[in-house]
Amino acid sequence: MVTALYKEFSDLLGDECVSACPADCAAYAYDAAGTAFVPPTLVLRPGNADQIAPVMELCRREGLHLVIRGAGTGLRGHATPGGADTILLALDRLCRIFSIEAEDRTAHVECGVTAAALAAAAAARGLWYPPDPGSMCVSTLGGNLAEDALGPHGLKYGSSRHYLLGMDICTPSGVTAYCPATAPHGLPLAQLVAGSGGQLAVMSRLRLRLLPPPAAKASLCASFGDTAQAAQAAAAIMASHLCPAALELLDALARQALDAYAATGLPQEGESILLLELDGHPAQVSDDMKVARTLLTEQGCQSLHQLDTQQTEAFFVARRALPTALRRLGQNTLCISTRLPCTRQPELCRALAVLSERHRLRMACFGHAGSGLLHPVLLPDAGQDVQEALGELFHVVQELGGTLEGGPELGQGPWLAQPVAAAPPLERGIQQVFDPTGLLYPGNILTLQQAQTCRSDG
Ligand SMILES: Cc1cc2nc3c(=O)[nH]c(=O)nc-3n(C[C@H](O)[C@H](O)[C@H](O)COP(=O)(O)OP(=O)(O)OC[C@H]3O[C@@H](n4cnc5c(N)ncnc54)[C@H](O)[C@@H]3O)c2cc1C
């Protein structure tokens, strides 16, 4: 069967775009979540966006599942096959920047371009592409939009979807269309597809908005005696009239991992740090810096340093590598994303300290504190079971009125299996319009049973 399929897809795309080689297929069984799934039957890497519709049609005809993949840096297992007879459509070769229209502040690109490449092309024309997820040098704009990725500057400048002007899509039902982000007389389909995690359609070509860069920037690095206090200071900043460009929190272990990984030149005092960046008109930035200094001092910071542009840039470069730096600290790392109101983050930090102590489990915590997005990272020793600690964390976050996301390990928790297994009826209905035959494989949400099957398979 594989040979026959290989021939059909090769005839369609050319040999160089199709692989059935077990080593290639095994490599695509993973994304950055790090958990192995079932390898795909074939890997397709088209070099032209017009090849996507025929691929969809052939998959439909043969009754195959299809998983869309950008660079595979996702942390939730979305871009990996969840079962047999799955074709993996990798879009990283669609990486042309067609144009930067400086006067219109727009870019026209293929979905496989990285955010870093677009930011560089925009900068060459005196413009700025703000979305800056930590993976921006590797992950694709298609993947960023599908996951609505958000980096440190998302606090003031929004997530990837805020820069979307329109996209060419190809649905499993065979519809190809250009969807503008705003549709005055219809439904904003582009906004629906972006953020859908590859479950509705393939985005191929994108029109994105660019901004002029801020006229001035300034940063402060404040250190605190403990992480809850740093989170409390972040909440105080967000409750003031300040509108920081970025407000990042790193606890002691995260900072230790960063220091071991790269020379950041960050101040060594205190346990946890907050990095605050302000930008805008020079006079406004100068006034805001005074307010920020006062606020952070009132919140009991142990030290306060102003960073120059080079130091700030060095921080953000190192910060992007933090998940990798943390992985060097232990054999296993389990990175969780929590979304909470800023005012509840200190309680989360306190709860993490208690959990870490009770379960004798090393934990780090870092994140976009101003956006309410913190990442507790579990660093279990070899063979240490984390399910009980994960369950408690789940309940803590729930009680604080937040949400929790993570890699496939979360789908293995008995406390999660039922609530996440089935999509709500309204979402299922929408999915059926785009994908009536269930062609796009829902590899992103695992029931407990599926997770166990995957584990025993792999
Ligand atoms: C070191 C590191 C740092 C990270 N930092 C951040 C961060 O700061 N902020 C953040 O939000 N995330 C972050 N992530 C997670 C990840 O990088 C992002 O989710 C990223 O957007 C995924 O892009 P990708 O191209 O790798 O997509 P993939 O992982 O390949 O796919 C992700 C999802 O997008 C879908 N998809 C991909 N391309 C398309 C397309 N063209 N059309 C339709 N669907 C598509 C896939 O089906 C899948 O569901 C980080 C990951 C790592 C490893």
Image: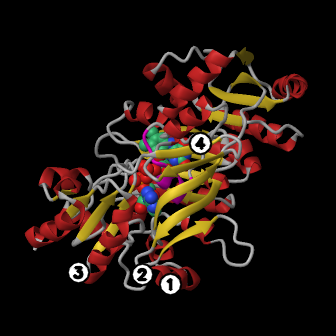
Residue under label 2: 173
Read off the magenta span. 138-148
**Residue neighbourhood size for the residue with mark 1, other residues' Cα within 10 Å, grouped as few (<14), some (14–19), many (≥20):** few
Numbered tag placed on residue 62 in the rendering: 3
Which sits earlier in the primary sequence, circle 2 or circle 4? Answer: 4
**Residue neighbourhood size for the residue with mark 3, other residues' Cα within 10 Å, grouped as few (<14), some (14–19), many (≥20):** few
Nearer to us: label 4 or label 3 = 4
350 with respect to 300 (left or right): left
- Residue 415 visible from this viewpoint: no
Q: For the residues marked 3 and 1, what is the alpha-carbon distance in whole angstroms?
A: 20 Å
Which sits earlier in the primary sequence, circle 3 or circle 1? Answer: 3
Residue under label 4: 100
Amino acid type at circle 1 is: Val
Amino acid type at circle 2 is: Ser
Please tell me which residue lies in front, 426 or 257.
426
Please tell me which residue lies in front, 335 or 127.
127
Please tell me which residue lies in front, 326 or 217.
217
